[in-house]
Amino acid sequence: MAVIRTDDDVGLYYEEAGTGDPILFLHEFGGHQLSWEPQLRYFSRRHRSISYAARGWPPSEVPEAPDAYSQARAADDAAALLKALGIAKAHLVGLSMGATATIEFGIRHPEMALSLTVAAAGSGASTDALLTRRFQDECVTLAARIEGEGLPAMAELYCASPARLTYRDKDPRGWAEFKRQFAEGSAKGRARTMLGVQGRRAPLFERKAELAALPVPVLVIAGDDDDGTLDVALFLKRTIPRCGLAMLPKTGHGINLEEPAAFNAAVEDFIRHVEAERWGVSPIVAGKNFSLVPRAR
């Protein structure tokens, strides 16, 4: 197997195909490296395309210590993988858990990022402290249930959440495969991640200063039936200087699997604009926020 070791000595399994400017794909909590297969097959035609299993997702190793899992560690794992492969800079594409890790990567390792695609980011984020606390409590409860009841039982609930129903209705075979792969994971790894990453990360709304200083080109992608990520998508668009927003209609959380053609087209167009240095600062972020004409003229 293709495995690299991180700076804290955790083995990460990866797969790659193609040559060209590299793209690193970061998966969501419900998926794993195989969730990016539609993207690897497409983008490997002109890019070195890499997906990997996050720590806690076999065939990557599953650390025992709860403190081995965090948002910062997830970003540093992506950096460790790139360094081990001899890659100085890459385009990063992340979904959900992988999207917040992608943002964290941009904050912690901006010199290594050619661009950041942030899809379905920020579930559970809120400006309301009570709602934030409720989400954190739900993470603790879900982690306990994953370890206590097992992933096959939890797959029946998790994969049928409201944000997954559009995928089930559009592509029952694909949704069934997604649910089966979720059930085959490591309960310990998923539970540790739910506690250490989702349950402890600061809401993106509380990181406005860091996001406003992000120098890297960013594309945010959201599905309009993924209600828990819509406010975050608009917040990121209005905060990150070089940020665009693509909204896919009648689409839920697993955007890259639910609408692979539209997702691939959006990412490809974004990367081409970045390569041509045509992804500038948004006018609103630059302070040009009048509707018709400037008031001073």
Image (cartoon, helix red, strand yellow):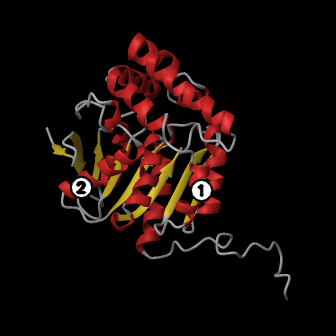
Viewer-proximal residue, 63 or 90? 63
The answer to whether residue 167 of the structure is visible from this angle is yes
Label 1 crowd bin: few (<14), some (14–19), many (20+), radius 10 Å: many
Q: Amino acid at mark 2?
A: Gly
- SS state under label 1: helix
Residue 44 shown left or right of residue 235 in the figure: left
Query: Given this view, does label 1 or label 2 mark the residue nearer the observer?
Result: 1
Q: Residue furthest left?
A: 1
Task: Check disc 2 and report the residue beneath it.
Answer: 18
Q: Does residue 169 sit above or below 242 in this rendering?
A: above
Indicate the position of residue 36 as horizontal and vertical percent values: 36, 42
Residue 185 visible here: no
Indicate the position of residue 177 as horizontal and vertical percent values.
Answer: 39, 25
The image quarter containing residue 130 is top right
Q: Which residue is mark 1?
A: 236
Q: In the image shown, does 65 or 252 lie closer to the viewer? A: 65
The C terminus appears in which quarter of the rendering? Answer: bottom right
Task: Tell me which residue sits at (43%, 68%) in the image.
Answer: 272
Label 2: which secondary element: loop
Q: Earlier in the sequence, mark 1 or mark 2?
A: 2
Type of amino acid at the residue the image marks with label 1 = Leu
